[in-house]
Image: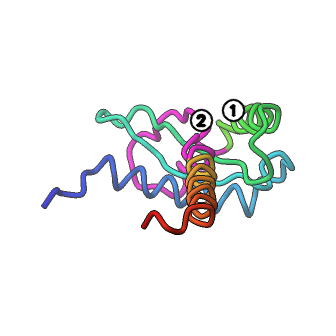
Amino acid sequence: MKEYSRTERLGDQIQRELGTFIQREVKDPRLAFCTITGVDVTADLQLATVYVSFLNGDDEQTIADGLNALGRARGFLRRHLGRVLRVRKIPELRFKHDQSIIHGQKMDALIRRAIELDKQQHQQDPDED
Protein backbone atom coordinates (compact mmCIF):
# COMPACT_ATOMS: atom_id res chain seq x y z
CA MET A 1 0.00 0.00 0.00
CA LYS A 2 1.33 3.43 -1.01
CA GLU A 3 2.02 5.92 1.75
CA TYR A 4 0.14 9.18 1.85
CA SER A 5 2.98 11.59 1.09
CA ARG A 6 3.53 14.99 2.60
CA THR A 7 2.88 16.71 -0.73
CA GLU A 8 -0.47 14.92 -1.06
CA ARG A 9 -1.47 15.85 2.48
CA LEU A 10 -0.51 19.47 1.91
CA GLY A 11 -2.35 19.52 -1.45
CA ASP A 12 -5.50 18.13 0.16
CA GLN A 13 -5.30 20.66 2.97
CA ILE A 14 -4.80 23.55 0.52
CA GLN A 15 -7.77 22.29 -1.52
CA ARG A 16 -10.05 22.20 1.53
CA GLU A 17 -8.95 25.59 2.86
CA LEU A 18 -9.11 27.42 -0.48
CA GLY A 19 -12.44 25.87 -1.43
CA THR A 20 -14.05 26.93 1.81
CA PHE A 21 -12.38 30.33 1.92
CA ILE A 22 -13.28 31.27 -1.67
CA GLN A 23 -16.93 30.32 -1.15
CA ARG A 24 -17.32 32.10 2.18
CA GLU A 25 -14.95 35.06 2.15
CA VAL A 26 -14.07 36.11 -1.40
CA LYS A 27 -16.63 38.61 -2.65
CA ASP A 28 -15.69 38.59 -6.36
CA PRO A 29 -18.81 37.54 -8.35
CA ARG A 30 -16.59 35.85 -10.96
CA LEU A 31 -15.67 33.32 -8.27
CA ALA A 32 -19.17 32.67 -6.95
CA PHE A 33 -19.30 29.28 -8.72
CA CYS A 34 -15.61 28.42 -8.51
CA THR A 35 -14.78 24.92 -7.29
CA ILE A 36 -11.30 23.70 -6.37
CA THR A 37 -11.08 20.24 -7.94
CA GLY A 38 -7.51 19.37 -6.98
CA VAL A 39 -4.11 20.63 -5.92
CA ASP A 40 -0.72 19.29 -6.97
CA VAL A 41 2.22 20.36 -4.84
CA THR A 42 5.80 19.99 -6.10
CA ALA A 43 8.18 17.75 -4.15
CA ASP A 44 10.10 20.78 -2.83
CA LEU A 45 6.80 22.33 -1.61
CA GLN A 46 7.54 25.56 -3.50
CA LEU A 47 4.67 25.50 -5.99
CA ALA A 48 1.04 24.41 -5.78
CA THR A 49 -0.95 24.01 -8.98
CA VAL A 50 -4.59 24.57 -8.09
CA TYR A 51 -7.11 23.06 -10.51
CA VAL A 52 -10.42 24.90 -10.68
CA SER A 53 -13.77 24.48 -12.37
CA PHE A 54 -16.47 27.08 -12.90
CA LEU A 55 -19.97 25.70 -12.52
CA ASN A 56 -21.60 28.78 -14.04
CA GLY A 57 -20.25 28.02 -17.51
CA ASP A 58 -17.49 26.45 -19.48
CA ASP A 59 -17.17 29.12 -22.15
CA GLU A 60 -13.74 30.63 -22.67
CA GLN A 61 -14.70 34.07 -21.36
CA THR A 62 -16.07 32.73 -18.06
CA ILE A 63 -12.95 30.63 -17.57
CA ALA A 64 -10.60 33.50 -18.46
CA ASP A 65 -12.44 35.90 -16.13
CA GLY A 66 -12.36 33.38 -13.28
CA LEU A 67 -8.67 32.59 -13.72
CA ASN A 68 -7.91 36.32 -13.89
CA ALA A 69 -9.82 36.90 -10.64
CA LEU A 70 -7.93 34.07 -8.94
CA GLY A 71 -4.64 35.45 -10.20
CA ARG A 72 -5.44 38.86 -8.77
CA ALA A 73 -6.46 37.31 -5.43
CA ARG A 74 -3.34 35.10 -5.25
CA GLY A 75 -1.64 37.14 -2.50
CA PHE A 76 -4.83 37.37 -0.46
CA LEU A 77 -5.31 33.60 -0.72
CA ARG A 78 -1.68 32.87 0.21
CA ARG A 79 -1.95 35.11 3.29
CA HIS A 80 -5.02 33.16 4.38
CA LEU A 81 -3.17 29.87 3.87
CA GLY A 82 -0.27 31.29 5.90
CA ARG A 83 -2.61 31.84 8.83
CA VAL A 84 -4.21 28.38 8.78
CA LEU A 85 -1.52 25.99 7.55
CA ARG A 86 1.26 24.78 9.77
CA VAL A 87 4.10 24.88 7.27
CA ARG A 88 7.25 26.96 7.21
CA LYS A 89 6.73 28.38 3.73
CA ILE A 90 3.46 28.65 1.82
CA PRO A 91 3.81 27.43 -1.78
CA GLU A 92 3.31 29.82 -4.68
CA LEU A 93 -0.15 29.33 -6.14
CA ARG A 94 -0.72 28.70 -9.84
CA PHE A 95 -4.30 28.33 -11.06
CA LYS A 96 -5.32 26.11 -13.98
CA HIS A 97 -8.72 25.27 -15.39
CA ASP A 98 -9.64 21.63 -14.82
CA GLN A 99 -10.78 20.18 -18.14
CA SER A 100 -11.88 16.83 -16.66
CA ILE A 101 -15.49 17.91 -16.03
CA ILE A 102 -15.89 19.11 -19.63
CA HIS A 103 -14.30 15.91 -20.95
CA GLY A 104 -16.56 13.85 -18.69
CA GLN A 105 -19.65 15.61 -19.99
CA LYS A 106 -18.55 15.02 -23.59
CA MET A 107 -17.91 11.33 -22.89
CA ASP A 108 -21.29 11.02 -21.18
CA ALA A 109 -23.00 12.58 -24.21
CA LEU A 110 -21.17 10.19 -26.56
CA ILE A 111 -22.18 7.17 -24.47
CA ARG A 112 -25.81 8.30 -24.36
CA ARG A 113 -25.77 8.82 -28.13
CA ALA A 114 -24.28 5.35 -28.73
CA ILE A 115 -26.91 3.75 -26.49
CA GLU A 116 -29.68 5.60 -28.31
CA LEU A 117 -28.34 4.54 -31.72
CA ASP A 118 -28.08 0.95 -30.49
CA LYS A 119 -31.70 1.05 -29.31
CA GLN A 120 -32.84 2.44 -32.65
CA GLN A 121 -30.93 -0.26 -34.52
CA HIS A 122 -32.48 -3.02 -32.37
CA GLN A 123 -35.95 -1.62 -32.99
CA GLN A 124 -35.37 -1.71 -36.75
CA ASP A 125 -33.79 -5.22 -36.83
CA PRO A 126 -35.42 -7.28 -34.05
CA ASP A 127 -34.75 -10.64 -35.85
CA GLU A 128 -30.94 -10.39 -35.79
CA ASP A 129 -30.43 -11.37 -32.12
Farthest residue, direction right: 29
Q: Residue at x 80, y 55 (%)?
A: 32
Kind of residue at disc 2: Phe
State the SS at label 1: helix
Farthest residue, direction front: 127
Which residue is more in the foreground, 80 or 93? 93
Which x, y percent locates residue 1? 12, 61
Magenta region: 77-103
Please name the residue that numbered disc 2 is placed on: 95
Asked if residue 99 lies in the magenta stretch, the reply is yes
Please name the residue that numbered disc 1 is placed on: 71
Kind of residue at disc 1: Gly
Q: Is residue 45 left or right of residue 82?
A: left
Q: Is disc 1 in contact with disc 2, using a CB cutoff of under 8 Å?
A: yes
Q: Is residue 7 left or right of residue 17?
A: left
State the SS at label 2: strand
Which x, y percent locates residue 84? 52, 58
Which x, y percent locates residue 87? 39, 49
Q: Residue at x 59, y 35 (%)?
A: 95
Q: Residue at x 29, y 35 (%)?
A: 43
Which residue is more in the foreground, 119 or 57? 119
Give how far apart the Cα atoms at labels 1 and 2 are. 7 Å
Which x, y percent locates residue 124? 62, 61
Q: Earlier in the sequence, mark 1 or mark 2?
A: 1
Which residue is more in the foreground, 119 or 8? 119
Q: Residue at x 58, y 55 (%)?
A: 108
